Image (cartoon, rainbow, N blue to C red):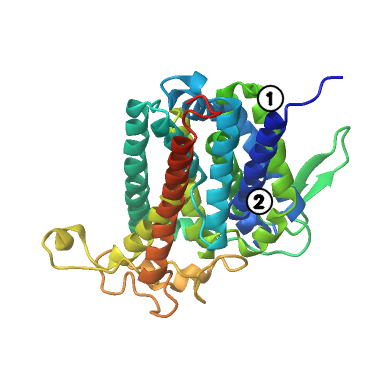
Amino acid sequence: MATLDPLFVGGVVLACFVAYNVGGSTTGPAFGPAVGAGVIGRITAGLLMSGCFFLGAWTIGRRVVETLGTDLLRDPGAFTPEVSVLVLGFIGGALFLGNLTGTPASTSMTAVGAIAGFGLAADQLAWAVVGEILLWWIVAPVAGFWLSVVVGRYYYTRIEHAIAIEDSEGPLVTLDRRGHVPRPVPGPNTTRRELVGSTAVVAIGCLMAFSSGTSNIANAIAPLVGSGAIGMESGILVGSAAVAVGALTIARRTMDTLGNDITDLPLTAALVVAVISSTIVVGLSALGVPASFVVIATTSIVGLGWGRASRTFTVAEAVAGEATTSVSVGGLRADETSPTVGDPAAAADRPDTAAIGDADAGDVPAAADLFDPETSVRVVVIQNVVPVLATAGSFLTFTVLSGGWLPI
């Protein structure tokens, strides 16, 4: 009777561990708003996360797997089973260290760093591919920032009116069993506004889950696929199954707090950031570029807040140097006048309904700002330190092991 290779078993276990944590940490930000609004339950959120993640991984995600598993090294054959196990260990270890600090770290940046550390030690790093990835890592957050500035300055209030969710009594959707096949219909007290708003919140959660699949599946299985220890399709199935376990277990707790700093925002801001960041991630994944949702979302939050605060002056005044605003603003905070769940009419009295350039166009209470400089600096520093640690640890370890039992 054949026995399983311990290295193969260890690699699969580590890959599942990474994927399990992806499912646990990503489900909260994706479906936390929908669960908090009472639109869907935790189990439904976990199932939607699992299905949409798998769809993203199976369709676009394989392109990112190829980038990390083969293209990042000049000789893909250097990715032996031994190397893949150690690389996965660095990815999981660095992410665990980031989790200990309470700061969401980028799994994509950490995975690229761990693989790049090995490539440097083995003199196998494909510098052209690394340069392309680094370029997109600069462009993507900047694009997220400016897109968010535009939305915050010109469209935020309209979006806020459109997606504010009414909270009627009874179920949102029921089954009509009068025909041969039961079909879902709005509940007896469900209004059109409530149905549209609730559907939008769930759809945006599905988009986030899909984008996570396109990018994050590679972080879990690329080393194994690159080493030939497991096939692409098998790897996606195993990784997605581990994500599903995380989404249906530990994510049930993270959804209560909505997973990470992004979801400390009111409903409107959280969904705007989610749409912008997820769309950018899906676009980069389609190009085969591993993208960091966390980093893009962080800059999008800053951009959205800055755009909201900039409503107090016109573009001409800004160009002439006659107006300034602070990046740390209270314009996105969930104060008593911000419509989220059950109060779609609250925005009617918001001061930001004034025309852009009016002195009160962006006036909001000064207390409880969205973020402070110290917190922002800590988040950005840790988001960069974790990948650096993975890179440095991988490079030093493989350098020490050169000429030993590892073929590098």
Query: Residue 53: x and y, percent?
Result: 63, 38
| Of pointers 1 and 2, the one earlier in the residue sequence | 2
Q: Secondary structure at mark 1?
A: helix
Choose between 268 and 232: the one closer to the eye: 232
Q: Can residue 154 be seen in this snapshot?
A: yes
Residue found 36% across the figure and 47% down from its top: 141
Q: Which residue appears at 47% of the width and 36% of the height? A: 398
Q: How many marks?
A: 2
Percent coordinates x, y for residue 144 in the rendering = 37, 48
Q: Residues within 10 Å of mark 1 (few under 14, many from 20)?
A: few
Q: Nearer the viewer, residue 72 or 274?
A: 72
Task: Identify residue type, mark 1.
Answer: Ser
Q: Position of residue 148 (x, y in %)?
A: 37, 53
**Vertical position of residue 331 compared to residue 245: above or below:** below
Horizontally, is 232 left or right of 175 in the view?
left
Instruction: Inspect the image, locate mark 2, and give the three-letter code of the amino acid beneath it.
Output: Gly
Q: Marks 1 and 2, how far apart in space?
A: 21 Å
Mark 1 vs 2: CB contact within 8 A? no
- State the image quarter where residue 100 is shown: bottom right
To which residue does mark 1 refer? 234
Residue beneath disc 2:
24
Classify mark 2: residues with Cα within 10 Å, few (<14), some (14-19) or many (20+).
Answer: many
Give the residue furthest to the left: 320
Q: Residue furthest front?
A: 404
Residue 192, relative to residue 320: is it above or below?
Answer: above
Give residue 210's mark: none
In the image, 274: left or right of 243? left
> Is residue 86 toward the left or the right of residue 324 in the image?
right
